[in-house]
Amino acid sequence: MFNQVAQDVHTLHGQVSQEGTEVEMSEYLSRFSLEAVGRTALGYSFGPLDVHGTDYSLALKEFGPTLVKLHLWRPILPWLKWLFPLSVLRAAASVFPWKVVRHMQAISDNVYQTSREVLRKKGEAIKQGDAAVRQEIGEGKDLISILLRQNILGLEGERLTEDDILGQMSLLLLAATDTTSASITRVVQLLAENPKVQETLRHEILEATTHAGRTLFDLDYDAFAKLPYLEAVVRESLRMYPVFYMANRVSDEDALLPLSEPITGTDGKPIHELFIPAGTTIWLNMLGSNRDPAIWAPDAHEWKPERWLAPLPASVADARTPSVFANMSTFAAGPRSCIGYNYALAEMRIAIAHLVLAFKFTPSDKEIVWKLGGIVSPSVRGSDSMKPEFPVVMSRV
Ligand code: HEM
């Protein structure tokens, strides 16, 4: 499925000359990630990738930056919901004298209405029977079709309400789209800045495809994961540039947190563990852990895909960093870790392979800065746009 979506990179060919054209890739890569999750998780297509700026994709993109502006006020939301009916809160939000609140309401209405429309169409197809489902993208094997079928078969009392399903759909779309597209954008930027790495990567992919008489469409999930240099580029980019640089957790009970290195107290004595009372919010510094020289080697702050081609230092395993992937914190760990990390990895490998085979990337004259919102997102220095921006010069290979 990713391969099919990635095939649409060819829609970019029309915009790119042989010698090099500056292309705004951010919008395009967001649409790519949205289309990938649309087809695989929802069994729904949001349309051709070169149709940009639909209200829906803009709403998803602006969700993170807008949410960050409201961050301080979030703790009062449960209280407001408890005190007032939803209709009163809606009416109040629509006249609230702060633009950010009204904007958040418009975003959330848009995501909700789109999810509802997708759900309505899926419900109808399932009611019409197998033939109608087979007409659908993915033939009804997507997550929401499976959930809906189980819901129909499930026992009374075990079924999810429509609002539950809509909530799951919106969460999936929000969690899957900008995270993965920002990570792919970062890889494209790093490849543009490191022509040697880009060339080595293209060479590896050509060896596995054209030179072996195959195309990228002949490679399956395992084959993509077994391209060592591609894997090294993906891992090193996720290590150095996790899109969620911090996450928080609240301790359920009193606990002692052991420290990897002792810190010195105000009395001059070393402290080896911290007492964490129940209810304490703890911020996890994922970026810091991924770049800790004591764990990853003194050159931990450098982007070096080659580090993954040799055995990693013993300190990486010894650190026992809570992790679901490659000893890094990028996808968090434990019961609230990322449920889509394998999906994200597959999407990244396939998108990057298609892009590198089709285009050469060089940096644009415009300086790219990454803004720390809910997730990091690219922007041009000096621009006040709310939307992510990533101009890059592309030439056809
Ligand atoms: C490179 C891309 C991605 C990164 C770096 C990433 C990272 C993360 C992180 C760090 C969390 C935990 C957030 C927190 O605790 O505050 C998370 C949660 C989550 N992710 Fe991802 N993610 C990515 C892609 C995806 C994709 C593609 C999907 C779905 C297909 C997905 C689905 C989710 C969901 C549903 C959660 C919430 C889990 C829960 O709260 O129980 N993510 N992700």
Image (cartoon, grey):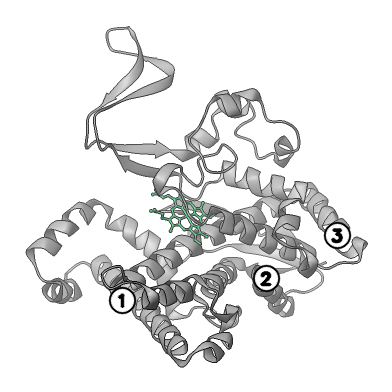
Which of the marked residues, 3 or 2, is nearer the chain's N terminus? 2
Q: Nearer the viewer, mark 1 or mark 2?
A: 1
Q: Where is mark 3, residue-wise?
A: 206
Q: CA distance from mark 1 to mark 2?
A: 32 Å
Q: Residue at x 19, y 76 (%)?
A: 94
Q: Nearer the viewer, mark 1 or mark 3?
A: 1
In the rendered view of the protein, which quadrant contains the N terminus?
bottom right
Q: Disc 1 on helix, strand or loop?
A: helix
Mark 3: which amino acid? Leu
Q: Nearer the viewer, residue 277 or 261?
A: 277
Q: CA distance from mark 1 to mark 3?
A: 47 Å
Left or right of 301? Residue 265 is left
Whether residue 386 is visible to the viewer of this picture, yes or no, is: no
Mark 1: which amino acid? Glu
Q: Position of residue 381 (x, y in %)?
A: 51, 56
Q: Nearer the viewer, residue 346 or 189?
A: 346
Q: Disc 2 on helix, strand or loop?
A: helix
Mark 2: which amino acid? Ala
Which of the marked residues, 1 or 2, is nearer the chain's N terminus? 2
Q: CA distance from mark 3 to mark 2?
A: 17 Å
